Image: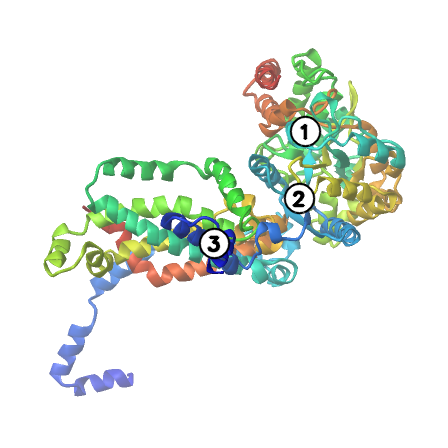
């Protein structure tokens, strides 16, 4: 009897442990329990499944709220916890880099411009969903956004934030002009208005806006950074040199020195303060004037009444402008990848896209053809440009697709720097273009 | 004739002499005045950021955006930005408390460990002690933007057992990586200014090394330790990168990242609320410094004179 009891005890307890092993295991268990009690968080294996989405802090808070509502609704249907996290748009790359390094983090992530290519190997393939949503939404208006390496669709195009010309209609009328249609119009009007103390404001500095507008100027003059193969550097052309000459003239005749130190917000401030006559910006500048109840200096008249948006100007090479394209992807290391894709299917339904777009007050411009003529853009003459601007708007990397090299060129603000050097006579247009070509060649070679 | 003058002749001669002796001589008053006047530009320079924060936080958006108005004055005072901060962000509900917890716990851990480490490197003689000292210094020089990459793996490894990502525990775990080298580096110099003979006396009186450390050395090093506490607390309070990378949950954010996330939306900066947040967030640090200013100054200088 005693022997059988000892045997069964041995079966339960196993081999006798050494003192060292006993102490280390006891310490580990005690430490684990202590930390669980201290943090108040259950251990990883005991936690509920949670679908997490990371996006940027949207200019219109209601857009974030609607996204969160949709995720919660989806979570309720799927019986899981959900969470939307936000960071400032300039900090998003650091967080993405951290998640890739640790192979842990959110399930769904917002990706800007070429991030889908940059993180291609860490992102789920979306080809099936891409096709399915395209059929439902009348097709995509862009075929370059969300692409990864080897042509894989690593993210779904989400929306774009366009860069129309934002103009003070009253000031332009005062100098006897119509709203500008070409870059030459912009130059002429800016020259007249600068003399009256109302310059044009385009950042020639390290800012997102500057990246977009300088590309627009280059493309409108027939220049380009790379060929359509997204590999061959093609900036050194007579069209590019003409574009650089134009920027120099525009800067000298229509702008002030402060644009060389501006970031993304300064042109908004300049417009809303009543100083700037024109700039290139999403509708946020106009919305700021509404929100802040800005007045035309020296009057009681609301400033927003005399602000309007028009299509980006036409140049010798046509009408072109760059924009911030947002895509949404799913990490490969996500434990909820399938659920994340199901959420995207849910989010890209007609009803939900419509609600998201409406909540953003039209700021999230659609990339699905059936939404291009959304009623919100007919609700105010300020938005009349919106349904058409997509025809002229390209992602960085045009005429190719945005690649890792594209993102590097953007992150280093090479084009704004080159144009600023030319505008301030630190380099001739030819020298600035040649230097830019050398920089681009080095970057594209490294990423080849 | 005033009543004061009238009573003067009536005063005893000794009383008049005593009054004259107690009065600060004019030359000394002039010197004092000159000193204060000379200090004024420095004080104005040092307080200018605070002034701009306060004045901007009290202006309306309309006035902030009006470039024709002086940025140095407010023509209309509003508390709207503070109200916005309280009602529309997690500033008072979560971020402030999270920051206090993270800064306090990280500082306690870092100063405790760093003090012992600094004492060992300053006093003990063992093989490689010089190299350890240099290694601590080099560790302190490694930028956070590089350190956060391997630290992500550490946090993830711990997170797989006890979920600490998206909680302030991830910061409490990682902040000591830059605070401990800093504290050690600061206190090593300080411990070297304390005469070894004092410790030797303690040994003669029967103290062990540990007992001598706690009963003799640490009380003498208190200004240096308080200086280390202040610096650690401030570094933790202001830290941005780790907080950004390890925490994205709104309720778990610290001040520096929370303010940035909620009050900078795309190209729109909520300047009034940003300034209100910066000002309010700076108050606890200012209060802390004001309590320990004397220790702080002596802690900084003592290490420098020997």
Image location of residue B22, percent across then percent down: 18, 74
Residue at 35% across / 63% down in the picture? Answer: B291
Rendered view: B159 above or below A313: below
Q: Are dots 2 and 3 on a single chain?
A: yes
Q: Could you say which is closer to the camera, residue A28 or residue A400?
A: A28
Name the image quarter holding residue A328: top right
**Residues under labels 1 and 2: Cα distance?**
17 Å
Q: Is residue A268 above or below residue B52?
A: above
Residue A230 in picture, x, y percent from top left: 70, 18
Q: Image quarter for residue B230?
A: bottom left
- Give percent across and percent down for residue B192: 20, 47
Q: Earlier in the sequence, mark 1 or mark 2?
A: 2
Q: CA distance from mark 3 to mark 1?
A: 46 Å
Q: Residues within 10 Å of mark 1 (few under 14, many from 20)?
A: many
* Lateral position of residue B259 relative to residue A390, left or right: left
Identify residue for label 2. Answer: A54
Chain hosting mark 3: A
For residue B60, side relative to residue B49 (left or right): right
- The residue closer to the viewer here, A414 or A340, is A340
Q: Is residue A391 visible to us here?
A: yes
Mark 2 — on which chain does it sit? A
| Quadrant of image for the N terminus of chain B | bottom left
Secondary element type, mark 2: strand
Look at the numbered disc 3 and give the secondary structure of its residue. helix
For marks 2 and 3, give the one nearer the viewer.
3
Q: Is residue B104 left or right of residue B207?
A: right
Q: Position of residue A284 (x, y in %)?
A: 72, 44
Mark linked to residue A114 = 1
Mark pair 2, 3: CA separation: 34 Å
- Residue where numbered disc 3 is placed: A29
Task: Give the side of residue B161 with respect to residue A379, left or right.
Answer: left
């Amino acid at each position: 009897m005693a022997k059988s009891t000892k045997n069964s005890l041995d079966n339960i307890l196993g081999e006798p442990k050494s003192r060292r092993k006993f102490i280390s295991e006891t310490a580990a268990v005690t430490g684990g329990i202590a930390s669980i009690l201290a943090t108040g968080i259950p251990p990883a294996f005991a936690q509920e499944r949670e679908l997490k989405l990371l996006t940027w802090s949207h200019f219109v808070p209601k857009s974030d709220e609607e996204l969160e509502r949709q995720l919660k609704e989806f979570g309720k249907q799927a019986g899981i916890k959900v969470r939307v996290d936000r960071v400032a748009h300039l900090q998003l790359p650091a967080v993405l880099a951290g998640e890739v390094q640790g192979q842990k983090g959110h399930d769904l992530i917002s990706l800007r411009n070429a991030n889908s290519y940059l993180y291609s190997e860490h992102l789920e393939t979306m080809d099936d969903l891409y096709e399915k949503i395209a059929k439902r939404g009348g097709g995509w208006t862009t075929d370059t956004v969300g692409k990864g390496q080897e042509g894989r669709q690593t993210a779904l195009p989400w929306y774009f934030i366009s860069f129309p010309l934002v103009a003070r209609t009253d000031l332009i009328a005062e100098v006897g002009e119509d709203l500008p249609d070409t870059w030459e119009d912009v130059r002429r009007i800016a020259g007249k208005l600068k003399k009256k103390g109302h310059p044009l404001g385009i950042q020639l500095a390290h800012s997102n806006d500057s990246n977009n507008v300088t590309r627009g100027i280059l493309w409108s003059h027939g220049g380009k950074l790379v060929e359509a193969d997204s590999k061959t550097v093609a900036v050194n052309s007579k069209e590019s040199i003409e574009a650089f000459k134009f920027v120099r003239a525009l800067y000298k005749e229509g702008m002030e020195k402060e644009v060389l130190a501006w970031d993304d917000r300064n042109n908004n401030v300049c417009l809303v303060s009543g100083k700037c006559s024109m700039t290139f910006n999403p509708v946020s500048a106009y919305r700021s004037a509404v929100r802040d109840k800005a007045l035309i200096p020296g009057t009681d008249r609301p400033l927003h009444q005399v602000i309007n948006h028009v299509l980006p100007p036409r140049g010798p090479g046509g009408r072109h402008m760059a924009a911030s394209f947002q895509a949404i992807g799913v990490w490969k290391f996500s434990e909820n990848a399938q659920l994340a894709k199901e959420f995207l299917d849910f989010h890209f339904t007609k009803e939900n896209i419509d609600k998201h777009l409406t909540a953003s007050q039209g700021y999230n411009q659609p990339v699905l053809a059936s939404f291009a003529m959304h009623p919100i853009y007919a609700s105010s003459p300020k938005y009349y440009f919106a349904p058409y601007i997509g025809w002229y708007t390209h992602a960085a990397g045009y005429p190719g697709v945005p690649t890792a090299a594209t993102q590097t060129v953007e992150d280093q603000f090479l084009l704004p720097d080159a144009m600023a050097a030319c505008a301030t006579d630190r380099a001739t247009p030819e020298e600035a273009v040649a230097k830019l070509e050398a920089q681009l060649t080095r970057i594209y070679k490294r990423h080849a | 004739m005033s009543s004061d003058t009238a009573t003067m002749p009536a005063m005893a001669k000794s009383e008049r002499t005593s009054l004259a002796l107690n009065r600060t001589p004019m030359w000394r008053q002039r010197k004092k005045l000159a000193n204060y006047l000379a200090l004024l530009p420095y004080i104005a320079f040092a307080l200018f950021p605070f002034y701009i924060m306060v004045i901007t936080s009290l202006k309306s958006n309309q006035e902030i955006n009006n470039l024709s108005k002086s940025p140095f004055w407010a023509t209309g005072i509003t508390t709207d930005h503070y109200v916005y901060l309280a009602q529309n962000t997690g500033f008072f509900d979560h971020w402030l408390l999270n920051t206090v917890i993270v800064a306090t716990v990280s500082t306690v851990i870092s100063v405790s460990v760093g003090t012992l480490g600094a004492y060992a490197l300053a006093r003990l003689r063992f093989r490689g002690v010089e190299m350890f000292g240099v290694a601590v210094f080099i560790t302190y020089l490694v930028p956070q933007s590089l350190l956060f990459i391997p630290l992500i793996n550490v946090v993830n490894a711990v997170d797989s057992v006890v979920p600490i990502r998206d909680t302030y525990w991830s910061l409490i775990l990682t902040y000591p990586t830059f605070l401990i080298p800093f504290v050690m580096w600061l206190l090593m110099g300080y411990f070297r200014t304390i005469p070894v003979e004092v410790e030797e006396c303690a040994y003669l009186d029967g103290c062990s090394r540990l007992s001598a450390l706690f009963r003799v050395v640490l009380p003498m090093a208190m200004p240096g330790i308080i200086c280390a506490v202040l610096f650690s607390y401030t570094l933790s309070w202001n830290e941005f990168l780790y907080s950004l990378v390890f925490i994205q949950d709104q309720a778990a954010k610290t001040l520096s990242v929370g303010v940035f996330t909620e009050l900078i939306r795309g190209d729109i900066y909520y300047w009034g609320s940003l300034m209100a947040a910066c000002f309010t967030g700076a108050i606890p640090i200012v209060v802390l410094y004001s309590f320990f200013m004397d220790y702080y100054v002596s802690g900084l200088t003592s290490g420098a004179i020997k």
